[in-house]
Amino acid sequence: MNAPTPPVPAVDSSTVMVLRDEASGVEVLMLERHLDSDFVGGAYVFPGGKVDRSDRLDEDLWRGIDLDLEARRMDTTPDVALGLFVAGVRETFEEAGLLFATRDGDQISGDDLRTESFTSARSRLNSRTERWDWTEWLRSEGLVLELGELTWWSWWVTPIGVHRRYDTRFFVASAPPGQEAGHDEIETVHSVWTTPKRALAAAAEGRAMVILPTRKNLEQLDVHTTAQAAVDWAAGQLPPRIGPEIVTEGGRVVVRHESFGSTEEM
């Protein structure tokens, strides 16, 4: 008999729910993934992606968090915790064009982001042919990543049995003032600011593909009336690890979510 195939390991990754306050309530930035994406193509998601080796930045390139404390809260090592925070900042810049960073203590502006240096850096991060380490660019521009702008919100792990698995920390953050978000036209083809309620309605009516982890985070976000209230709530939580499983029910292969007492077809 053949030995059972070991499960694909879950890769550390980060996702950031970027928020802003509008008359209609709290809005969150969502991106539509390219149909050819290797993971949930066509779905509306938050900016995010897997942790790269280069995300373990030197201490002079970031500030704003107690790394040992965050590592204990996340039940991981300081090295992994740092990678998760930095990946969240990097992916938000790469996919949405927003950068949580300062230079000489001043917030990076929309004008900064439109310069050739910043647009080129974003393009290189987005390149499918080049794996670019942005460390020296950050240092040459005198940039310090403001990791304290991100607050851990939830923790989801892709079920065993699929070909790509992610161990994902969702973060929440208020949008950097003076910056304008926009999709990258490579991994994502559309961007929209929307209230959680509108996004959930679009998913329920079949006008948008929104996978269950995204929906559940939108539902959790929908109870907050301001971006700051959402951030403050997250700061007081210790999110549980949510790990759905693939099972067979009635001859169908489904994903079972014990945390929510629900199943959905694969």
Image (cartoon, rainbow, N blue to C red):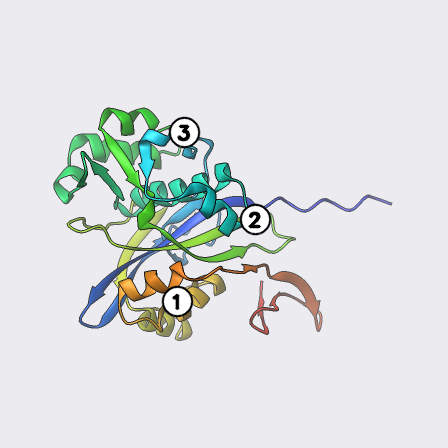
Q: Secondary structure at mark 1?
A: helix
The residue where tag 1 is placed is 218
State the residue in front, 232 or 241.
232
Q: Position of residue 23 (x, y in %)?
A: 17, 71
Precedes in sequence: disc 1 or disc 3 = 3
Looking at numbered disc 2 in the image, what kind of residue is underneath it? Arg
Name the mark nearer the viewer: 1 or 2: 1
Give the percent coordinates (x, y) of residue 181: 23, 51
Q: Residues within 10 Å of mark 3 (few under 14, many from 20)?
A: few
The residue beneath circle 3 is 131
Instruction: Please give the name of the residue rendered at 49% of the width and 39% of the height, measured from the top-left corner.
Output: 78
Residue at the image point whose x is 49% and y is 60% from the top:
239
Measured in 3D between alpha carbons, the distance from the residue under mark 1 to the one under mark 2, in whole angstroms, is 21 Å
Q: Closer to the camera, 156 or 253?
A: 156
Q: Amino acid at mark 1?
A: Leu
Residue farthest left in this picture: 111
The residue under label 2 is: 165
Label 1, label 3: how many angstroms apart (C-alpha)? Answer: 32 Å
Q: x, y (%) of residue 180?
A: 19, 50
